[in-house]
Amino acid sequence: MPPSQPALTAPDGIVVCGLGGLGQACLSSLLAFNLPIRCIDREPPKWVDLAQGKRLVDVTLLGDMRNPEVLIEAGVASARAVLLLSQDSGVNLEAALQVRLLNPKAQLVVRSSGGSSSLERQLQDRLPGLAIVDPQLLTAGIFANALRPDGTEAAFDVEGELFVVRSTLQQQAASRDLFDQLSRLQRLVQWFPIDGAPGGPPASGWWNLDAKPAAGDRLLWLELASTLETRPRSHRGQWAVLWARFRLLFESCQEATERLKDRRNSLLSWGLLSLLLLLFVGSFLFGNASPLRGLMLTLALLKGEYLDAFSFIISGSNNELSPAHFPLAALALIYALGGTLLTAWLVALILDRLLAARIGNQEPKPMVAGTPYVLLLDGGPLAARLEQQLRLQKFQVVRVQENKPEPLAYPSLDRALRSLRHCRCQAVGVLSEDLMANLSVALELQQRWPGVRLAVRSHSLSQSSNFNALFEGMQVINPLEVAADAVVATALGERVRGVLRLAEENLLITDYKVNSSDTLQGLSLGTVAGGYGLIPLVLIGYGAIKPIALPNPERVLQLGDRLVVLASLAALRQVEAGNLKKRCWCLELRSLRPNAPIFEVQIALARYLGSVPGDMAKYVDLEHGAQRTAPLYQVPGRLLEQALKRLGVDCELVDATTCEA
């Protein structure tokens, strides 16, 4: 066994079952934490990363994950978490039951495919520590952000609040530093200096907020929009709508005429000509010198009536039948039989439309000409989740499902393009499981619409983001690769809501509930953000109903509070271990203005330093010179500096190394 992989005897070991694309991506994330790992697969895995395969060859067992002997040999009984990641949901669930019998305390992560079934939901409710994850649906947010046609980097909702990530490019050197550019409803996700690498991981806040962005720097801002407020619908004039519909009707008639010209020898053309000929001949045969009377009788025969119509035909002969009427009676019978078939065909057509509307195979309603829309090709449950997220933000979505027709989806791309030829496509998601077919369709549509945004689903490419440079204007996304961090975080006990891809990094939207053994208890949100390198998104206090979006940094977490954060997998690992980053700043108090409210100053100091006002008296005793506070993180320190200056205190936030002296 290599020295880099310790034996799986410690209670923090991880067992990964199923070494396909998702399993290998999860191993890449787990290896960064240097945890004891064991692997199980039925066949020798086909390693995408050969170096990783050589590193794990001695800790990989070949066998069935449902076999208790194989599980025991892999160390499941003492494992902290077990990842069951085969493509067969039934196999994963059966293996989960075996693992639970061997280890009642291990965290189980079971991969689901094709949507959550009733059995999966019931087992998740009944078995504690079991989490069902669908990597396709978990990464729907990344596809939705790649298809957003409004120019924003990302958008997502948490507890009914909509957050938007925007990218701004500095046109000239900023006159204010990064901290002064922040607002109450805004957080900095990443800063890309034009002359260097980012100052820290995305969403960490580990960069110097006293710096001023230079011309050419790019900033990613997280902003709170109003409660699920989205782009307003365009208000088109009534005359424009009527004119568009008239133009569509006129062009449809032109196309129908052209189709008839192109199909002169088709059954449809012959049928139409035959009908006109029958009407013309019947008008003279059955009219008895009155063409109009003959036309009416011909229509009655074609409607299926025979006796009444024939009695009118022979009414000039005193209603008496003679052998001379037999040819006319036979011809009328032929007309009636043909009319009966025509009536049956019309009834069948009407019933087909009614049943289609009742059963759910109807196509979407046509959109007004010029309407912008997002096109989703195939994808099944992933496309349904994407449609839900995009429609929530008021984007028009059109789906095409060729292999498995679904309600309100076009059965073919050609049919959709014909119906939407007067609308404007803004983005296309090609979501089938065949990468080559996806690329073929995507390149054809890119040639048809040069400026359209394209997101292509990939199953066979590792590091698929590297292939984006080959296809300009196209994003190739591998859901298994992206979902690996979320699956690993779930295995470590986190509750992951979704995944975002920002600044070439995977960021997880994670839910925490503060309990007595939690490393977050008693910490202010400023300490949580600065110490662990994450962004608190929403706070729901214990017993509260209304969530607080982007809560204030001085808010202290208490038992029962719920906190939703945006963080990388490494930051979540630091939260679990309780490893706070060193505080690098302190506040230097130099003087007080006359009649300054001393007690209010002590309250402000206590709120940001996590103490009681009585202990802050030493900091306001400035008779013998300036006083320096205990080390702080930069954001709480700057906020405290602003609060004390408003109270008449001359102070400044300085580097912590000067405070230690």
Image (cartoon, helix red, strand yellow):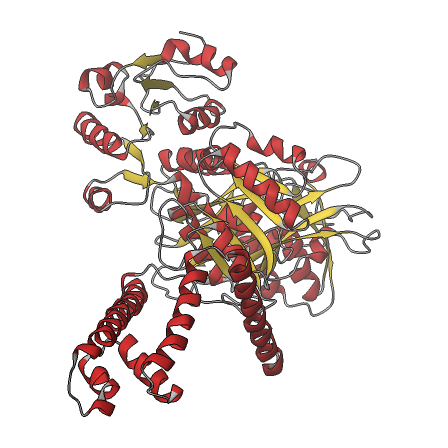
Residue ID at (61%, 31%): 467
Count of numbered circles in the view: 0
> Percent x, y for residue 648?
71, 65
Q: Nearer the viewer, residue 46 or 343?
A: 343
Q: On the rendered structure, is 560 left or right of 24?
A: left
Q: On the rendered structure, is 420 left or right of 105?
A: right
Residue ID at (21%, 90%): 317
Q: Is residue 154 above or below residue 457?
A: below
Q: Give the farthest residue toward the top.
A: 1
Q: Is residue 353 above or below residue 384?
A: below
Q: Quadrant of the C terminus?
A: top right
> Percent x, y for residue 112?
31, 38
> Percent x, y for residue 235?
60, 76
Asked if one can make out residue 643 in the rendered structure from this viewpoint, the answer is: yes
Residue ID at (61%, 67%): 370
Q: Nearer the viewer, residue 246 or 271?
A: 271
> Percent x, y for residue 222?
60, 54
Q: On the rendered structure, is 48 left or right of 98?
A: right
Q: Nearer the viewer, residue 231 or 5?
A: 231
Name which quarter of the figure residue 578 lies in: top left
Q: Nearer the viewer, residue 48 or 458?
A: 458
Q: Quadrant of the N terminus?
A: top left
Asked if one can make out residue 204 in the rendered structure from this viewpoint, the answer is: no
